Image (cartoon, helix red, strand yellow):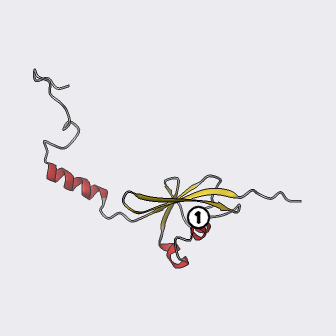
């Protein structure tokens, strides 16, 4: 007789908007994939699944990736601004004196930096 594998406990996390995180815990059968977790959540229609950006524990994962016990499946929303462009814009607005590594350096009363 073949032993029956115990069910998997996984969590599914999404952030529909900045500073708003939703998490649910799911019990799935052994051999479940990311797609199985998404279907079990009820958050998305079947047609939406191929469009989603997903990961497991911060690493990009496809819908067919097998899940392990206690995995954290993450659903990523697209970036509104490229981080490199945002950094350049902040630097341009702040100017050279107020940006960079030594911008927060304090000066003591005798003029020495600490």
State which quarter of the image contains the N terminus.
bottom right
**Foreground residue, 4 or 95?**
4
Residue plotted at (70% across, 63% down): 29
Q: Is residue 38 above or below residue 11?
A: below
Residue 63 % position (x, y): 56, 67
Residue 89 % position (x, y): 20, 56
Q: Secondary structure at mark 1?
A: helix
Residue 12 is left or right of residue 88, and the answer is right
Q: What residue is shown with label 1?
A: 34
Q: How many marks?
A: 1
Q: Is residue 51 above or below residue 20?
A: below
State which quarter of the image contains the C terminus.
top left
Q: Residues within 10 Å of mark 1 (few under 14, many from 20)?
A: many
Residue 58 is left or right of residue 95, and the answer is right
Residue plotted at (29% across, 62% down): 81
- Which residue ends up furthest to the left in the rendered image? 110
State the image quarter where residue 82 is shown.
bottom left
- Which residue ends up furthest to the bottom in the rendered image? 47
Residue 91 % position (x, y): 19, 50
Residue 31 % position (x, y): 69, 62
Residue plotted at (53% across, 77% down): 45
Q: Is residue 79 above or below residue 45?
A: above
């Amino acid at each position: 007789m073949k032993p029956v594998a115990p069910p998997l406990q996984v969590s599914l996390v999404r952030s529909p908007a900045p500073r708003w995180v939703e998490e649910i815990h799911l019990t799935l059968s052994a051999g479940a994939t990311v797609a199985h977790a998404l279907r079990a959540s009820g958050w998305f229609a079947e047609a939406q699944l191929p469009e989603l950006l997903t990961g497991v524990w911060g690493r990009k994962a496809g819908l067919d990736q097998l899940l392990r016990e206690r995995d954290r499946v993450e659903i990523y929303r697209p970036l509104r601004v490229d981080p490199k462009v945002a950094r350049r814009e902040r630097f341009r607005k702040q100017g050279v004196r107020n940006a960079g590594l030594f911008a927060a350096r304090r000066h003591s009363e005798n003029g020495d930096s600490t």
